[in-house]
Amino acid sequence: MTTPHHVVGPPVIIAATPVRPLPSPQPAIAPALPPVCAVDLMTVDGSAMFGAQWKTKEAKIIEVPAIPDAMPEFETTYDIDPHAGEAGFDDSAWPTILPTELEAKRGGGKVSFLWFRTTLTIPTRLGDFDPMGAQAVLALCIDDYAEIWVNGELPRAAGRPSPATVQGFNMPQRLVLSAAVSPGDTFELAVFAINGPISAAHENTVWFREARVEFY
């Protein structure tokens, strides 16, 4: 009876997966401390301090051609219309809503998307508070999810918590608008609000739980 031989080959070296550097600049993380000043954008007076006029429009899912390198069986795919996060997007034909109507339950339920747009202008004063040089943070919570565009950009970073893209079911989002604002600075906001969970579409609607500008 022969004894089986164990063939031992050269050692297999498994190279570590290279860590790619994160793109720069990275979205800033908002402070965890209480703000020095906070303004509620869901009130008429609060939005008026920033000259904000809110507009809204439902977004549609549309069928479009697949991307060039898609597998052969995928001839079409889907997109969102309109792309209202782009800088300078023309929302002049959209209906204007009062800040107090941000809490209204919009959309038809199920798989539903809505855009909300406004421009915020930093005033000279906010009551007794002088915003000059302060860090400004936008604090939002959307039922159920949201993506926040600022001046045509969607701040985000792969592989770590991001202040602007979807955070979780009814999770507050806090996005640094500027590390140091000056009176007259403007921020073009576009909030893409999403009903969810998408894979378990239900009878819920889309609405704001909170919207503030915080200063530090």
Image (spheres, grey):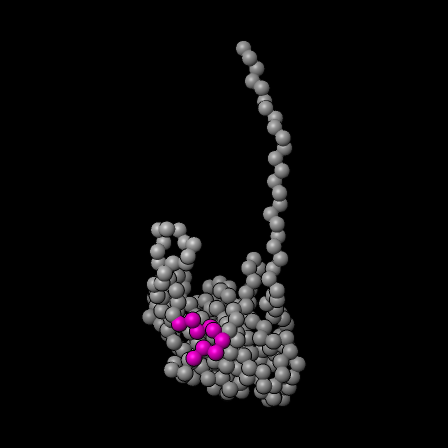
Question: Relative to 146, does residue 45 appear above or below in the rendering?
Answer: below
Residue 123, percent across and down?
A: 58, 87
Magenta span: helix, strand or loop, mainly? loop
Image position, residue 96 (x, y; %): 40, 83
Residue at image point 39% right, 67% down: 80
- Residue 134, located in which quarter of the rendered image? bottom right
Question: Which quadrant does the C terminus fall into?
Answer: bottom right
Which of the pair 148/34 is nearer the observer?
148
**64 left or right, relative to 161:** left
- In percent of width and height, residue 23 lies at 60, 62
Question: From the viewer's perspective, is 92 left or right of 12?
Answer: left
The magenta-colored residue range is 82-90
Query: Any magenta on residue 53?
Result: no
- Picture layout, residue 200 above or below residue 127: above
Where 81 falls versus 45 (above or below)?
above
Q: Residue at x 61, y 86 (%)?
A: 183
